[in-house]
Structures are given as structure tokens and as C-alpha cells.
Image (tube, rainbow, N blue to C red):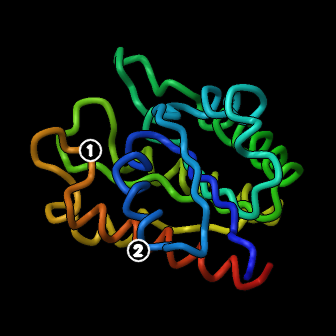
Amino acid sequence: MSKKIKVVLLGDSIRMNYGELTAKKLGDGCSVWQPEDNCRFIKYTQRGVFYDWREFICGSDIVHFNCGLWDTCDLAGDGPFSAIDEYTAQLVRTAKELQRISKKVIFATTTPVRPGQEHNNNERIMAYNKSAVSAMEDIGVQINDLWTPVYADLEGCIRADDLIHLTDKGIDICSDLAADIITRTAATL
């Protein structure tokens, strides 16, 4: 009997949208752990990696993670929650720790929002994604591009009521992408 691949999924409410279906699509060959908690912004996720969720992450075969919508969020009209340089530096710090305590790390890009979303905008999200992808590639982290296919069909993939969370179609697309890259990565272990 072959050993199950230990997979960890980390991320905000978007991961919470697609995480359960991703686990189902991965099937019996994978043991999937994901926090019940919304991982929110990068420093919250970082605390989880270094402390709160560490026992569940250590020794993982694959960690698939994302932070971004909370970081790019401008709640008070005075700029995003995390400045882009801070966001990128803390992503690198978190990814390096994940590389140290697990075998493979995958970073998922932040999904877009529909026009009119009160606290986020796609120009800012694109800039943060560009910075994150460059930094992650520099340290050997794989990239799962969730942005592009969701952006290609915003009305079909992003809910009309809140302009930010995934529809059933968006959940299906993102879970397919996550399950696919995790499966391909598992084949290299």
C-alpha cells in the first residue's frame, strides 16, 4: 500500500470556498488538512505557520497557500492593509519557513473582484500578484495562477452579492486548478 500524500491548504475565505472540493477531487491518495479558520492577511497566516498550525504543517508533502485579498483591502480609504513591499517580504518569510518544514510549496495568486467592490480593486490585486509571483519564483515556490481564469469570467466566477467571493463555477475552477497542481507536484515526490 502506498503512502498517502500529506497536503495542507492555507488561505483566506477564497481557500475556504474551494478547499473542501479540492480535498474531494484529490481523493483517497491524499490526506488534506486545512484550518477551519480564515487565514486572513499574510501576518495572520505567518503566525499560524510559525505557531498555531505548526503541528499540522510540519512534515507535509505539499503546502498550497495564498494570502492577498485582506492585504490589498483598503477599509478606511487610507491605503491597503499591507503595503506591497511589506506583503511581499512577509510572503517570502512565510514561504521560506514552509519550505523548511514541508517538501513542496505552492503559492496561489489572489483572485480578482468584480467592479464596484468597495474595498478592493483589480489594479492593486494585479500589482500585488506580480510582486508575489516574482518573489515566489525567485525562491523556487511553484505558482498556481487562480487570477487569470477567474478574471476571464468575473460574472460567472465571482458572486454578485458581495463582488469578492466565488460562485459555484468559481469554486469548481479554483478547486480544479488546486487539485491539478497538487496532483502534478505529488507525482514529483
Q: Position of residue 26 (x, y in %)?
A: 50, 73
Task: For label 1, count other residues whose C-alpha is less than 10 Å away and answer few (under 14), some (14-19) or many (20+).
Answer: many
Above or below for 35 versus 176: above
Q: Position of residue 50 (x, y in %)?
A: 78, 31
The residue furthest left is 161
Above or below for 86 versus 136: above
Is residue 115 or residue 105 the one in the foreground? 105
* Residue at (22% x, 69% y) in the render: 153
Above or below for 25 versus 20: below
Question: Can you identify the residue that label 2 sits on?
Answer: 176
Can you say which quadrant of the picture contains the N terminus? bottom right
Question: Can you identify the residue that label 1 sits on?
Answer: 164
Q: Report helix, strand or loop for mark 1.
A: loop
Can you say which quadrant of the picture contains the C terminus? bottom right
The amino acid marked with disc number 2 is Asp
The amino acid marked with disc number 1 is Ile
Q: Quadrant of residue 78?
A: top left
